[in-house]
Image (cartoon, rainbow, N blue to C red):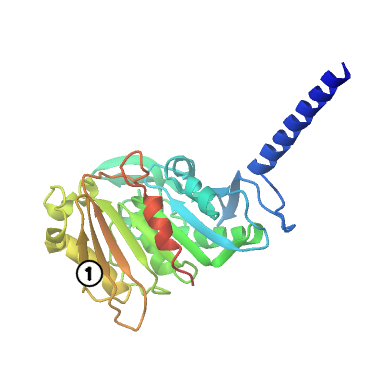
Amino acid sequence: MKKNWKIALQVLSLFCALFIFNACGDEELVDPGGNELTAQKRIDHTLNVDGKNREFIVFQPAGIQVSSPVPVVFMLHGTSGDGEKFYNISGWKEKAAKEKFYAVFPSSLAYCIIEDGVKSTTTKWNHFDLDSIACPGQKLYDDVKFFREMLKFLQTKYPIDPKRVYVSGFSNGGQFTFRLAVEASDVIAAVAPFGAIFTEQNKKPLSLIPIYHGFGNMDDRFFPLNNGQPLPMGAPLMNLGGMKLSTGTICNTFGLTYANTLKETANSAFWTFNTPTKGNTNVYYVHEFKDMTHEYPNGDNYPIAATELLWPFFSKYSK
């Protein structure tokens, strides 16, 4: 009888030990050196900017030392979307969990807009041209100010490295990413707009930062550059007047010549513009994806995930 009790106690002890080990393995709060560590969690924030409540989601990975600053990636949604949508589908929270950085998913405001003669109310970032499609009589809020205030707030709450702040955006969020590359590049180390075209505004960037520009040749937002047709893949793309104007404008704005190199694979074309005009060291990458439509690639909607390309790009740069 005693022997059976001993066996039972040994089994119970082993079970408890395994339970404690697994629990600690999921969300350990202190490392072997005694440093306090973060637990993985989602945190929703509301910040009042110019009298308007602005919302954003923070993804905090497990295992960050609270005394050691880490990078942060902002993911900006497209028209009609919000932070919740891209928290779920972009892949950035999963990448942040693996690589140990913060990922932030802000939401834009909703406006009455008129596009292609159709009036609707939908979310839009205040990119360079929002005033040209907004219904009259609305106040258009300053999203650059929102971004700056959000970043300041985050730096008071989380161990974020101010030298490693990165932004990616899709569609209208990509357009706003381009605006941030001009008007907030003093606090951003690198940007990656997807599914968006840059429009010239004759503004000088606060800093010449690296840009990774991605889109699909089947993205209908780009069809006007090719008389309403899908974009050609590879070298012929840069012969299109509209594409050459857009990429040339980016090069001119960010202190690069139009000299470039092209690498092609069966499913993509990749241009590098990295010849400076002012002694700068930034770069502009253009990545065209074969058969990709108007989407932010996440590995499910397209065979390549943007995060797998962009994190290695982002992590090379700091202010």
Front residue of 52/102: it is 102
Q: Give the residue at the far bottom of this rendering.
A: 279
Q: Secondary structure at mark 1?
A: helix
In the image, what residue occupies the spot 42% across and 65% down?
190
Q: Which residue is nearer to you in this view: 137 or 69?
A: 69
Residue 157: percent from the left, percent from the top?
65, 57
Across and down, in percent, residue 237 comes to: 15, 58
**Residue 309 figure quarter:** bottom left
Q: Quadrant of the N terminus?
A: top right
Q: Residue at x 27, y 61 (%)?
A: 286
Pick the residue in front: 290 or 231: 290
Q: Is residue 282 left or right of residue 294?
A: right
Residue found at x 22% / y 69% = 248
Q: Is residue 142 visible?
A: no
Few, some or many residues within 10 Å of mark 1 (<14, 14–19, 20+): some
The residue depicted at 41 percent of the width and 60 percent of the height is 312
**x, y (%) of residue 203?**
35, 72
Looking at the rendered structure, the number of numbered marks drawn on it comes to: 1
- Identity of the amino acid at label 1? Gly
Residue that badge 1 annotates: 248
The answer to whether one can see residue 76 in this image is yes
